[in-house]
Amino acid sequence: MGIRGVILQEGVTLSVVDMTVVIEKQNYLDDTTVPESFPSLSTPVTSTAGNAPGKSSYANITSKPSRKKVNVHTLFTPEGNGIDVVVPVDSIRAISERFANTTYGFFLGKKVAYPVLANYVRNTWGKYGLVRSMFSSSTGLFSFQFSFMDGLDSILENGPWFIRNNPLILKKWHPDENLLKEDVSIVLVWVKLHGVPVTAFSEDGLSVIATKLGTLLMLDSYTYDMCMQSWGGSSYARVMIELRADVELKDNIVMAMLKITREAYYTCNVLVEYEWKPPRCLSCNIFGNIHEECPKNLGAGEKKSVKKPSQTF
């Protein structure tokens, strides 16, 4: 069985809750460990796991005693309706406080290794108060915590962020959300609108143009000044738009400019330049999938390629 003995501590009552057992284990390191693999110990180590006094074990060398205690205990909670256990809300609230000022996200398209990401955000987001980052391999999500909420908001407002030309989709962390890497049907993209008439550099003018593309969220500082003063040398308007995967991305918008002296108008073309055009699948209406590589299309292609059995004998 691999267990040579069970030793009960003296004076300990044999019961379900308070029984302490020490399992004696074989020391496999004596024959297989390279002497240079571990640092030398200045003082002998006495092992309680079956090692003779003076001999060291892997746990003795690598582990450090922790003064923190985790109070695990038997805890029964209400159940029913297909639910086996319920985590108390007070416990969730206490853990949530550790994730204050946190955002999480994932890459749309190609993946970027965590060391590359960590190095980038450490050098770029430090001025925003970045405290720490982590990666969850089970969900594929990255998390970033900031020392204050203003820093987190600045990160979101100055996005989208690109690392090695791959967009990082970010969202604010909230305890009531189940953090999963979800299909993306909405993305934020900076768009340049070329050829906007000076009389259309206004809240209404840019809003009506941007609405044809998606939902207008904000203007960059120069475009904002143009709207406020109607004076400047910019050849385009730069706006952040929320794009939907089920709406076609337009590259040109024909707009009519009404004349104020008589009932007539003239037309002009506004060219749309996306600073980043996300890959989009027309079959499943999500961003990140390439239409030709979508599983739905591949499945349809496989069905089409199946030949009926020959009727000739």
Image (spheres, helix red, strand yellow):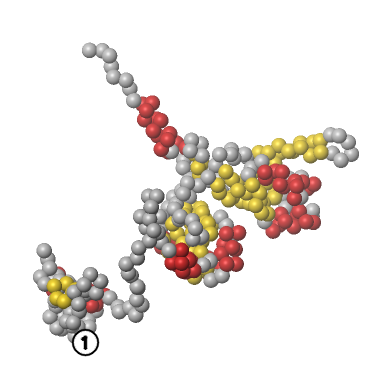
Q: How many marks?
A: 1
Q: Residue at x 71, y 47 (%)?
A: 207
Q: Residues within 10 Å of mark 1 (few under 14, many from 20)?
A: few
The quarter of the image holding the C terminus is top left
* Position of 49 relative to 117 (above/below): below
Q: Is residue 30 left or right of residue 39?
A: left
* Position of 227 relative to 302 (above/below): below
Three-letter code, disc 1: Thr
Report x, y in % for residue 227.
76, 53
Q: Which residue is mark 1?
A: 43
* Position of 38 relative to 84 (above/below): below
* Position of 244 relative to 75 (above/below): above
Residue 178 versus residue 17: which sits nearer the camera?
17
Report x, y in % for residue 197.
76, 45
Q: Residue at x 18, y 74 (%)?
A: 14
The quarter of the image holding the N terminus is bottom left
Residue that protrudes farthest toward the right in the picture: 261
Q: Residue at x 72, y 53 (%)?
A: 234
Residue that protrudes farthest toward the bottom in the picture: 43
Q: Is residue 298 left or right of residue 204?
A: left
Residue 177 versus residue 62: which sits nearer the camera?
177
Report x, y in % for residue 282.
51, 36
Q: Residue at x 38, y 55 (%)?
A: 79
Q: Is residue 123 left or right of residue 34?
A: right
